[in-house]
């Protein structure tokens, strides 16, 4: 007896509704609300002209390669010194996330050195810093070692040695400044000042909006983020930032898709008030991206001049005429936190689910090999020869569909990461990738339902499966079931598409 297509369609539809409900009912939910307009950010004055006065960057420069001992390794860097006589202000560059090569700071370091500011750019440590484990205090100690080294140089004014930090470095530099009075000033570029998880979630939402990606793509990624158990993602920047007494200069680009610059600014101002520090300057640079460049090209207008004039003018420039100035920043949504995933949806459980599914898929072939090796096959040959091959082909297609789904999800996430850097013409590819992922998930669901129906029908027609065939059917159907539930949790069956 064969199951009719109408019955199969109804069964598949009911299973689809049930799986879609899983995505809606189970936590955590992530839906950042629009950021309420703040009048203080809608009437920002223009940047004072004195900060933008031209800087003559033509002094001769001398470079030295340095190697500083640090915890568990040595830190390699490049020191650039103005050759002009006298003691000069100096600054240490602290990189953002990633490998942090000193070469990324070469244009700024050379400009400042030619303008009369000594600089050190150094390679980020490789011991104690990786994708999973990030000790911001350890990175702050590295920056302090560079500060102390600069203070020993006869060409440097020890009272005017500071730290420049970008992005992730915005969680590092305040620790160093709060820890040591040797830090004379602090420059923050695209500093989040909120937790890493809030910053990443905001950046993800903003970039997906710019890519015109479906809302389900955001839910997929944020649920995956909620299952990541990296401690540093929930780091609280405020305690260290609230202890900074030194002059602070902060830059934010108004086209930066990676930093919630309005909330980051509010957090910085709150911290300065807690510290009793009125020596802070916040400048919003028009058309500036995350690195203060215009679409990854030249630096935004006025950035290098403001930086050099502020450093060279200390301590007089520490207390500006206006704390906030520049272009008008527009932040659309709040930087909401991503709730931690429940125990059954954490990274460990997801990995276990995939492993169990993989075991289920290989259990059948392994059992078949063992049967052949032992020369044991007591099933009725004629009936099984007719009924088993179609079922085996269905199970094989299910395994390939499951593999295709996993690969497509990884490829889709990679696609989003790539297009978050260069978004030109990206949205058709993003929509196509999302459609492929959803269709593969639905295909796997249909295969599960039809395979169960075919197996039941075969049993009614006289199929007498052997032990290894039982293992094959149970393994593939069970493994696919686990993957379907996981896909449902990550919203692959939710509506709207």
Image (cartoon, grey):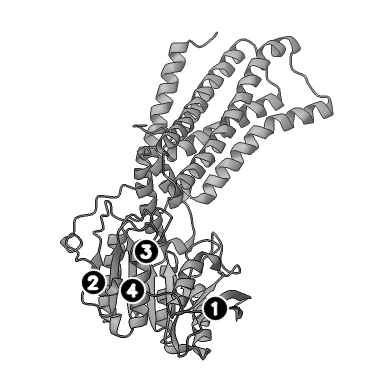
Could you tell me which quadrant the C terminus lies in? top left
Residue 259 in which image quadrant:
bottom left
Q: Earlier in the sequence, mark 3 or mark 1?
A: 1
Front position among marks 3 and 2 = 2
Front position among marks 4 and 3 = 4
Q: Residues within 10 Å of mark 1 (few under 14, many from 20)?
A: many
**Cβ atoms at labels 2 and 4 below 8 Å apart:** no
**Cβ atoms at labels 4 and 3 below 8 Å apart:** no
Q: Earlier in the sequence, mark 3 or mark 2?
A: 2
Point 33% across, 80% down: residue = 247
Q: How far separated are the C-alphas under marks 4 and 3?
A: 14 Å
Q: Is residue 240 visible?
A: no
Which residue is identified by label 2? 48
* Front position in the image: 316 or 459: 316
Task: Report helix, strand or loop for mark 1.
Answer: strand
Q: Earlier in the sequence, mark 2 or mark 4?
A: 2
Point 25% across, 64% down: residue = 326
Q: How far separated are the C-alphas under marks 4 and 1?
A: 22 Å
Q: How far separated are the C-alphas under marks 2 and 1?
A: 32 Å
Q: Is residue 362 visible?
A: yes
Which label was assigned to residue 79? 1
**Cβ atoms at labels 3 and 1 below 8 Å apart:** no
Which residue is identified by label 4? 249
Task: Report helix, strand or loop for mark 4.
Answer: strand
- Seen in the picture, residue 316 relative to 23 is either above or below; the reply is below
Q: Residues within 10 Å of mark 2 (few under 14, many from 20)?
A: some
Which residue is identified by label 3? 192
- Seen in the picture, residue 70 relative to 425 is either above or below; the reply is below
**Cβ atoms at labels 2 and 1 below 8 Å apart:** no
Q: How far separated are the C-alphas under marks 3 and 2?
A: 25 Å
Residue 367 in which image quadrant:
top right
* Front position in the image: 194 or 123: 123
């Amino acid at each position: 007896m064969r199951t009719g297509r109408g019955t199969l369609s109804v069964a598949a539809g009911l299973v689809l509704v049930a799986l879609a409900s899983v995505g809606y009912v189970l936590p955590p939910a992530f839906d950042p609300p629009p950021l309420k307009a703040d009048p203080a950010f809608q009437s920002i004055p223009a940047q004072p002209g004195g900060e933008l006065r031209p800087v003559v960057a033509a002094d001769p420069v001398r470079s030295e390669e340095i190697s500083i001992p640090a915890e568990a390794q040595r830190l390699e860097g490049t020191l650039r010194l103005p050759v002009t006589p006298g003691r000069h202000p100096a600054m240490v560059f602290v990189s953002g996330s990633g490998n942090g090569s000193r070469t990324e700071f070469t244009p700024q370091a050379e400009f400042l050195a030619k303008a009369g500011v000594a600089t050190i750019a150094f390679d980020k440590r490789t011991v104690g810093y990786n994708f999973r484990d990030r000790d911001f205090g350890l990175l702050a100690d590295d920056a302090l070692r560079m500060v102390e080294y600069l203070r020993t140089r006869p060409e440097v004014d020890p009272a005017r040695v500071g730290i420049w930090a970008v992005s992730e470095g915005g969680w590092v530099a305040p620790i160093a400044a709060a820890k040591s009075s040797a830090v004379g000033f602090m420059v923050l570029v695209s500093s989040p000042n909120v937790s890493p998880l809030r910053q990443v979630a905001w950046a993800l939402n903003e970039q997906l909006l710019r890519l015109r990606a479906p809302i389900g793509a955001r839910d997929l990624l944020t649920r995956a983020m909620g299952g990541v158990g990296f401690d540093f993602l929930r780091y609280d920047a405020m305690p260290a930032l609230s202890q900074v007494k030194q002059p602070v200069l902060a830059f934010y680009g108004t086209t930066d898709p990676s930093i919630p610059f309005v909330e980051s600014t509010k957090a910085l101002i709150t911290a300065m008030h807690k510290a009793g520090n009125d020596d802070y300057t916040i400048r919003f640079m028009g058309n500036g991206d995350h690195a203060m460049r215009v679409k990854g090209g030249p630096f935004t207008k006025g950035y290098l001049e403001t930086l050099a004039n502020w450093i060279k003018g200390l301590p007089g420039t520490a207390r500006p005429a206006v704390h906030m100035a520049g272009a008008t920043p527009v932040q659309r949504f709040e930087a909401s936190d991503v709730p931690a995933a429940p125990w059954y949806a954490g990274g460990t459980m997801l990995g276990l689910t995939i492993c169990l599914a993989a075991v289920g898929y290989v259990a059948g072939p392994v059992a078949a090999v063992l049967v052949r090796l032992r020369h044991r096959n007591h099933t009725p040959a004629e009936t099984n020869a007719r009924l088993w091959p179609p079922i085996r082909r269905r199970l094989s297609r299910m395994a390939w569909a499951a593999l295709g789904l996993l690969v497509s999800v990884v490829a889709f996430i990679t696609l989003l990461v790539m297009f978050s850097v260069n978004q030109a013409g990206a949205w058709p590819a993003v929509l196509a990738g999302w459609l492929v992922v959803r269709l593969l998930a639905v295909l796997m669901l249909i295969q599960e339902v039809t395979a169960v129906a075919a197996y039941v029908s075969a049993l009614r027609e006289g199929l007498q499966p052997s032990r290894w065939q039982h293992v094959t059917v149970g393994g593939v159907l069970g493994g696919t079931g686990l993957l379907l539930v996981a896909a449902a949790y990550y919203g692959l069956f939710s509506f709207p598409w």
